């Protein structure tokens, strides 16, 4: 009987897959990549058509020797790494490292680690897909060229240990741009007005919202306008002038992709992208439920696709019919918008078995595993269910020359909401009024006007950054989480109450990158490069052609940057602060949290002090110097040098100028000065 060697990536899969196969199958793991570009050198021969130099990864020599011995004994070597570019590349490296005839190898893939899927994959053995391999090689070589060529410049200009990356630099620029938008944002005043109305025949009053006048929609811009409208409305009679009843449907959500799973897990469960991917990996690789052998509970977790296999559709239809009823099944395939990306060849993330006993799952899974599994399960179920339908009511009400609107709706048929209610946004608070027409009497119970100010764009969270990266075409499912993790670990970005703030070091790196390598930080350029990688994967573009097109321009920018750095003596900036231990003038250094003062006599003198950067303005409270400070998480703010005796603090840079209207200090908003009291509304410039 033939002996088969099955090689997977992760040791966690070995035990699970072993139980699915017979005695003539030996299952082992490569522990990810077996070889890669060397860490100690560039590893790409730029003089020889960018030929990569691969070596066995340090520490994997013994593992490779063991795999070689097993491969020689086996009649067939089945490469069962993950079903994506990275997995295909790992299989290719294994094939080139194990020292046995290529005819001995076959590639198998499965989208879920279940007995059915694994056994089915054995019936569909294939050769390696070199388009997938080449797409991964292109990404690896591009990232190596960018990282290893630019990082030394950052070391010289800012501090050692910094790094640049192709996707990482574009993501940092996105965060930086958002910070600039927030700093330049000028709030605009507006008012809302709600009339609480008693309706003839109804026990509860309803809320009518101010719409405008007979000429159309009207925006209430200030207190004076609000007072005039309020005065007129309070004296007016409220009359129904138009009633419209209708139907509205709400389509079910699409099943999860990597990106949408990370976003929903963040908003619903409070998980970071890294935590989401770690737990999803556990669910994919296999968990024992109810004492049964371990099996994968979800399908493959790195995907751009919303496609669902026919078998999964049939299983969902049967389950939904049994639990909710036939009418709850999806009536037609909406399909969703196609991402246009190669990984759409995969499936969406879904549960592998809808008949899993949830009581047993609760006892067998960790709390976080269960929460993420149920999130994936309910989303998938909802995606296979019918749309929800609503009865709607829209009423126009006149009050003198002004018009208010009443909106109400009620669920006519739950559809997918029967499975996904917890994630549904609340509908309008009004109860549907059955009998209302132009003869219905209305009376004003209460009129409420409220002042508001437009809000700046939200700072990025991990989830919203992933969403925008996906929409801009930057990165792919496997890169979102590692990119954010790198930005945080390098301290280019810090997290405070889930919000991402660019740090002083991050600003320094981003400014150098923008000045010297504008293409690398440009999200549009990065997205275009991702599209070219997709072309390689489709077989429409030769992989080295991508590198040949990219490198000459990049090399030119690199040489210019190196020359400019040569003109500048790279030395620490000297200050007038005297070291109280040895008397030297202290210098500015960069540390993990930004700038600090250090004695230039290191290592003989190791004295350090916090760096107090002056903002160049006087404190509006006590007249002391305003300092540029940072929170523990790296967020910039402005505070008085006399703290704690003076409690002045501002997130925006203050100005020495006073507001001519109210006398309070002005703050900088982009190129304009605005009053620090937003209710004043004064703007200069």
Image (cartoon, rainbow, N blue to C red):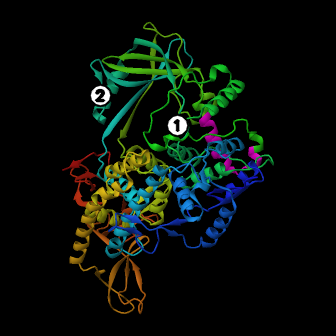
Q: In this view, does 256 lie to the left or right of 314?
A: left
> What residue span does the magenta drawing correspond to?
361-380
Q: Which of 425 and 211 is in front in this view?
A: 425
SS class, disc 1:
loop
User: Is residue 376 highlighted in magenta?
Assistant: yes
| Above or below, comparing residue 128 to residue 577 in the picture | above
Q: In the rendered structure, find residue 492 and report the number of the disc placed on it.
A: none
Please provide percent x and percent y for residue 359: 77, 41
Please provide percent x and percent y for residue 495: 47, 59
Q: Which of marks 2 and 1 is nearer the N terminus?
A: 2
The answer to whether residue 629 of the structure is visible from this angle is no
Q: Is residue 578 left or right of residue 395?
A: left
The 10 Å Cα crowd at callout 2, few under 14, some 14 to 19, many 20 or more, is: few
Q: Magenta stretch: dominant SS?
A: helix
Please tell me which residue is depicted at 34% across the width and 63% down the height of the picture: 49
| Above or below, comparing residue 500 to residue 642 in the picture | above
Q: Is residue 359 left or right of residue 653?
A: right
The answer to whether residue 466 of the structure is visible from this angle is yes
Give the farthest residue toward the left: 685
Q: In the rendered structure, find residue 306 and report the number of the disc placed on it.
A: 1
Q: Nearer the viewer, residue 44 or 340?
A: 44
SS class, disc 2:
helix
Quote the CA–CA distance across marks 2 and 1.
Answer: 53 Å
Please tell me which residue is depicted at 69% across the width and 44% down the height of the picture: 119
Please tell me which residue is depicted at 31% across the width and 80% down the height of the picture: 572
Q: Nearer the viewer, residue 519 or 217?
A: 519
The 10 Å Cα crowd at callout 1, few under 14, some 14 to 19, many 20 or more, is: many
Tag 2 residue = 228
User: Is residue 279 highlighted in magenta?
Assistant: no
Please provide percent x and percent y for residue 362: 74, 45
Please tell me which residue is depicted at 63% across the width and 23% down the height of the picture: 328
């Amino acid at each position: 009987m033939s002996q088969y060697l099955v090689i997977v990536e992760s040791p966690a899969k070995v035990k699970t897959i072993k139980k699915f196969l017979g005695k003539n199958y030996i299952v082992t793991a490569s522990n990810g990549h077996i070889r890669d570009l060397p860490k100690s050198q560039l590893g790409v021969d730029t003089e020889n058509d960018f030929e990569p130099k691969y070596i066995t990864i340090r520490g994997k020599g013994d593992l490779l020797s063991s795999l070689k011995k097993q491969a020689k004994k086996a009649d067939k070597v089945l490469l069962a790494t993950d079903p994506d570019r990275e997995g295909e590349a790992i299989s290719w490296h294994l094939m080139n490292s194990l020292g046995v005839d290529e005819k001995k190898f076959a590639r198998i893939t499965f989208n879920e680690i279940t007995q059915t899927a694994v056994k089915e994959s054995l019936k569909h053995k294939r050769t390696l897909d070199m388009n997938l391999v080449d797409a991964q090689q292109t990404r690896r070589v591009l990232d190596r060229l960018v990282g290893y060529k630019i990082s030394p410049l950052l070391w010289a200009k800012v501090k050692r240990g910094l790094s640049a990356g192709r996707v990482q630099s574009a993501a940092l620029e996105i965060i930086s741009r958002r910070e600039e938008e927030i700093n330049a944002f000028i709030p605009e005043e507006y008012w809302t007005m709600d009339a609480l109305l008693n309706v003839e025949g109804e026990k509860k009053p309803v809320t009518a919202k101010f719409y405008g006048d007979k000429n159309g929609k009207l925006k209430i811009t200030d207190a004076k306008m609000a007072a005039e409208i309020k005065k007129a409305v309070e004296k007016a009679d409220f009359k129904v002038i138009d009633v419209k009843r209708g139907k509205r449907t709400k389509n079910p959500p699409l099943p999860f992709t990597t990106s949408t799973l990370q976003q929903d897990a963040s908003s619903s469960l409070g998980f970071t992208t890294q935590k989401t991917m770690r737990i999803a990996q556990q669910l994919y690789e296999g968990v024992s439920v109810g004492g049964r052998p371990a099996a994968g509970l979800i399908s493959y977790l790195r995907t751009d696709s919303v496609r669902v296999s026919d078998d999964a559709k049939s299983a969902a239809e049967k389950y939904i019919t049994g639990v909710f009823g036939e009418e709850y099944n999806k009536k037609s395939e909406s399909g969703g918008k196609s991402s246009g990306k190669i990984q759409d060849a995969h499936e969406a993330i879904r549960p592998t078995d809808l008949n899993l006993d949830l009581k047993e799952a609760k006892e067998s899974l960790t709390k976080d595993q269960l929460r993420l599994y149920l999130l994936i399960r309910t989303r998938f179920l909802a995606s296979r269910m019918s749309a929800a339908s609503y009865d709607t009511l829209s009423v126009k009400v006149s009050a003198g020359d002004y018009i208010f609107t009443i909106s109400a709706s009620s669920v006519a048929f739950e559809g997918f909401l029967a499975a996904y209610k917890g994630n549904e946004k609340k509908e309008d608070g009004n109860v549907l009024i059955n009998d209302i027409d132009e003869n219905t009497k209305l009376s004003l119970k209460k009129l409420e006007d409220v002042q508001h100010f437009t809000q700046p764009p939200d700072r990025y969270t991990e989830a919203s950054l992933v969403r925008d990266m996906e929409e801009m075409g930057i990165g792919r499912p496997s890169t979102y989480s590692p990119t954010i993790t790198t930005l945080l670990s390098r301290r280019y970005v810090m997290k405070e109450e889930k919000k991402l703030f660019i740090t002083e070091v991050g600003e320094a790196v981003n400014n150098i990158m923008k000045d010297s390598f504008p293409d690398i930080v440009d999200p549009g350029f990065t997205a275009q490069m991702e599209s070219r990688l997709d072309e390689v994967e489709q077989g429409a573009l030769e992989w080295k052609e991508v590198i040949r097109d990219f490198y000459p321009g990049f090399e030119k920018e690199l040489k210019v940057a190196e020359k400019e750095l040569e003109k500048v003596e790279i030395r620490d900036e000297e200050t007038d602060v005297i070291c109280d231990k040895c008397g030297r003038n202290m210098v500015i250094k960069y540390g993990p949290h930004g700038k600090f003062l250090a004695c230039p006599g290191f290592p003989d003198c190791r004295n350090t002090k916090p760096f107090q950067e002056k903002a160049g303005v006087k404190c509006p409270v006590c007249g002391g110097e305003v300092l540029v400070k940072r929170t523990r998480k790296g967020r910039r703010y402005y505070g008085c040098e006399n703290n704690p005796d003076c409690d002045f603090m501002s997130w925006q840079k203050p100005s020495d100028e006073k507001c001519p209207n109210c006398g309070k200090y002005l703050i900088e908003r982009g190129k304009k000065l605005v009053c620090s009291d937003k209710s004043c509304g004064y703007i200069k410039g």
